[in-house]
């Protein structure tokens, strides 16, 4: 069982280019999340999905979009990358959205926008 | 606004005990999580507290006081592999996790 996989592991991208970060989980979790992690800051929620077919905006959604066509996949798209989107991106999932539900994290994608 | 405060960095000695504090101000409270994150890796779950008191899990314990907006993570018998960042996160009234910036723990021999 792989848990959560993310691709690519790292990427250098020219500003203005479009980029999709992939995330797949095999735990049949209902909820999925995208975070970015920057030095000195806590994880910040970009978008989330409580169940397949639904998505919601987190704390920092501008410049990003997501889709949740099925349970397993939750891709994150940067329509036109900017240098401020240089960050480490983590995908996470949880069985549900109740208080106790811990989140499981993928290995992360390190993105550099030049 | 919502705020989670943790010390930026702490240093401790192998075999000793260390306490990492976390204070929070959030819109609502539905539990507090501690995660461990080794450099270059993903966060992994350590503990969850929703009621006041101490939760013990092996060498790690976590304490919560809801009235004080305060939690701590206690690590005993420190090992070199405990060198990592420790993240405090609170689940707010919208059931989203609000994360602290993390405490980098350095273990010295």
Image (spheres, helix red, strand yellow):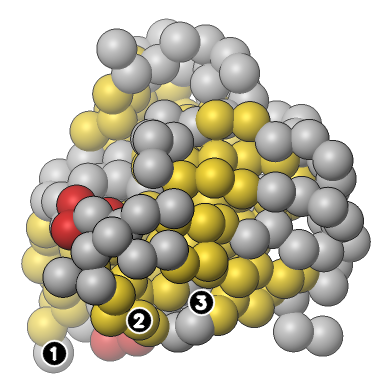
**Viewer-side label of 3, 1:** 3
The residue at 29%/12% (across/down) is: B1
Q: For the residue labelled by badge 1, is the local secondary structure a helix, a strand or a loop?
A: loop
Disc 3 to disc 2, C-alpha distance: 14 Å
Which residue position is annotated with label 2?
A: A11
The residue at 43%/74% (across/down) is: A109
Q: Chain of mark 3?
A: A
Answer with left or right where residue B75 lies relative to residue A16.
right
The residue at 82%/85% (across/down) is: A1
Q: Are marks 3 and 2 on the same chain?
A: yes
Q: For the residue labelled by badge 3, is the local secondary structure a helix, a strand or a loop?
A: loop
Q: Chain of mark 1?
A: B
First reached walking from the N terminus: tag 3 or tag 2: 2
**Marks 2 and 1 close (CB-CB < 8 Å):** no
Answer with left or right where residue B44 lies relative to residue B76.
right
**Marks 3 and 2 close (CB-CB < 8 Å):** no
Number of numbered discs present?
3
Residue A65, located in which quarter of the rendered image?
A: top right
Q: For the residue labelled by badge 2, is the local secondary structure a helix, a strand or a loop?
A: strand
* Closer to the camera in the image, A18 or B61: A18
Q: Are marks 3 and 1 on the same chain?
A: no
Residue B15 visible (yes or no): no
Q: Label 3: how many residues lie within 10 Å, few (<14), some (14-19) or many (20+)?
A: some
Which residue position is annotated with label 1?
A: B109
* Closer to the camera in the image, B50 or B57: B50
Residue A75, located in which quarter of the rendered image?
A: bottom right
Disc 3 to disc 1, C-alpha distance: 29 Å
Answer with left or right where residue A4 lies relative to residue A41.
right
The residue at 12%/83% (across/down) is: B108
Which residue position is annotated with label 3?
A: A107
């Amino acid at each position: 069982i792989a848990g959560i996989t993310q691709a690519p592991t790292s990427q250098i991208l020219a500003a203005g280019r479009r980029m999709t970060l992939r995330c797949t989980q095999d735990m049949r979790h209902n909820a999925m999340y995208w975070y970015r992690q920057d030095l000195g800051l806590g994880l910040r929620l970009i978008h989330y999905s409580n169940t397949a077919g639904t998505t919601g905006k987190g704390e920092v959604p501008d410049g990003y979009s997501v889709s949740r066509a099925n349970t397993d996949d939750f891709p994150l798209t940067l329509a036109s990358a900017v240098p401020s989107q240089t960050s480490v991106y983590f995908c996470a999932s949880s069985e549900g959205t109740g208080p106790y539900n811990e989140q499981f994290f993928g290995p992360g994608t390190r993105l550099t926008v030049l | 606004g919502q705020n989670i405060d943790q010390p930026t960095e702490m240093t401790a000695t192998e075999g000793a005990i260390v306490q990492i504090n976390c204070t929070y101000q959030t819109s609502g409270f539905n539990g507090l999580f501690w995660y461990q994150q080794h450099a270059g890796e993903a966060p992994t779950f350590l503990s969850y507290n929703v009621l006041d008191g101490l939760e013990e899990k092996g060498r790690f314990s976590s304490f919560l006081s809801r009235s004080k907006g305060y939690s701590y993570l206690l690590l005993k018998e420190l090992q070199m592999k405990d060198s990592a960042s420790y993240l405090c996160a609170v689940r707010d009234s919208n059931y989203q996790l609000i994360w602290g910036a993390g405490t980098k723990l350095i273990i010295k021999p």
